[in-house]
Amino acid sequence: MACKVAVIGAGPGGYTAAIRAAQLGAEVTVIEGDTIGGTCLNWGCIPSKVMKTTAELLDKLQRSQEFGIRVNGSIAPDMEGLMARKQTVVQHQIKGLLNLFEQHKIQYIRGFGTIRAMNLCTVRLADGNTMEVPWDRLILAPGSAYAEIPSLPFDGARILSSNDVLGLRDIPRSLLIVGGGVIGCEFAFIFACLGSKVTVVEAMPRVLPLPSVDEDCSKVIQREMKKRKIELLVNRTVDSVEESEGRCLVTLGPSPFTKDPQEFDKKPMVIVADKILVSIGRKPNTSGTGIETVGVKTDEEGWMTVDREMRTNVPQIYAIGDALGPSRPMLAYVASAEGLVAAENAVGGEHEITYDAIPGVVFTIPEVANVGLTEAQARNQGYNERSATVLFRSLGKPHVIGEIAGEAKVVFDAGSGRILGIHLVGPHASDLIAEGTLA
Ligand code: FAD
């Protein structure tokens, strides 16, 4: 008899695992409480990149004269058109995924899944009924959700999550972005290009303060923010927010997360903004999944823990994707790679995941991309590290396409010459990093 594999969550982790398990002969059921495609397709990668595409095109069109194009009439963003295009792209992909499920004879159930006991899930359907799904192997791919700051509760109108911002009908005149991480920085450039006055507040001393992002890449992004009149306030956090005449008055204080704030950073400050986007990180989507019923372990923050075979502490249960938390890259293609490993192992394989050469990409304008170690990481790991940097402005192509900001840095081991890491900030960094990854 075929192995029964159930998958909770149909994001890039869950749908990839489901298709692979079906290809390997399993009888697969996928349970999804929202929409097939998960965060990536509905609330993340795809809609935000549709917005970035429009923002970049608008930016280029506004520089049309530089490229020898005369535009008769004005050029302006059209949010209605942008949102309609976003919907078309998302719906197209949803249709594609549903077709793939059908082709692979995957049973797809729309409803909220809960582990009831070993080998059994129940699903609460939209009409209030429940359904039982028996399984031999379970793959948990419930993803993550946006985190909230208690002093800035989301209201969907003025204080927005990343989900809310993807459905805006109008371009805010001014937008305060709390959190200068990946999502915050991406939206900062998008809305600056669309015409908002953008301010970014970041608790750490630099934007993109991730261990994988080279400090020089952050510096270039900060310089580009300045050129686009994006105001950046580092070493700050939000103390409180009040509403006045339909606008938000936000009081900022010194960040408790910074070691050596400058005098300027310590002074309280009030920012007035029409809307606030809070993008301070993600939290695990495990509540209600019933993992405690069967004793699936999590860390103190609730992220599930797995071994290199993507197996939780319960041998028949695997976990993948964002729900494993920030100790691994929280990216769509990482979730998919983990999904492949989990699916293969669920049907009897012995595969291990490796994270050594996974590229990271930030879709700012210009983009940031990296693979491997930063200089600091290489040093900490005991390498006699060296680096070489090339500025995009010293090459021909960036001048041809009119995008000269950025640099490429190669980190290598001085003794062996082995490449340890590649860090790009510049046009098409997200495409170029693929070669760095192969290297
Ligand atoms: P998800 O995609 O979150 O899917 C989990 C699914 O499980 C959800 O649909 C949820 O409804 C469902 N679910 C949860 N619990 C249950 C339950 N009990 N029963 C039934 N269903 C359940 N990554 C990139 O690689 N590139 C990008 O450009 C990029 N941009 C992003 C932009 C934004 C604004 C955001 C928020 C994220 C972005 N990401 C990007 C990250 C990417 O979206 C995630 O890494 C990816 O979606 C994780 O996939 P996943 O399958 O683990 O979880």
Image (tube, grey):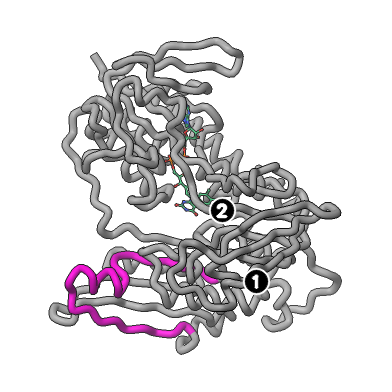
* Residue type at the position of mark 2: Ser
Residue 422 seen: yes
**Closer to the camera in the image, 200 or 62:** 200
Circles 1 and 2: CB distance less than 8 Å? no
Relative to 345, does residue 137 appear above or below in the rendering? Answer: above
Residue 279 — which label? Answer: 2
Residue placed at 55% from the left, 70% from the top?
Answer: 234
**Residue sticking out furthest to the left:** 415
Residue placed at 79% from the left, 55% from the top?
Answer: 247
Is 369 placed left or right of 197 in the picture?
left
| Disc 2 element | loop
Residue placed at 22% from the left, 39% from the top?
Answer: 309
Membership of 383 in magenta stretch = yes
Under 8 Å from ligand 1: the CB of mark 2?
yes
Residue 395 — which label? Answer: none
Q: How many marks?
A: 2
On the image, the x and y values in percent for residue 47 come to 59, 49
Residue 230 — which label? Answer: 1
* Residue type at the position of mark 1: Ile
Relative to 426, does residue 144 appear above or below in the rendering? Answer: above
Relative to 426, does residue 106 appear above or below in the rendering? Answer: above
Q: Quadrant of the C terminus?
A: bottom left
Relative to 382, does residue 344 appear above or below in the rendering? Answer: above
Crowding near the residue tagged with mark 1, few <14, some 14–19, many ≥20 C-alpha atoms within 10 Å:
many
Residue placed at 49% from the left, 86% from the top?
Answer: 393
**Closer to the camera in the image, 178 or 351:** 178
Crowding near the residue tagged with mark 2, few <14, some 14–19, many ≥20 C-alpha atoms within 10 Å:
many
Membership of 265 in magenta stretch = no
The span picked out in magenta is 366-392
On the image, the x and y values in percent for residue 161 come to 62, 47
Is 382 placed left or right of 199 in the picture?
left
| Disc 1 element | loop
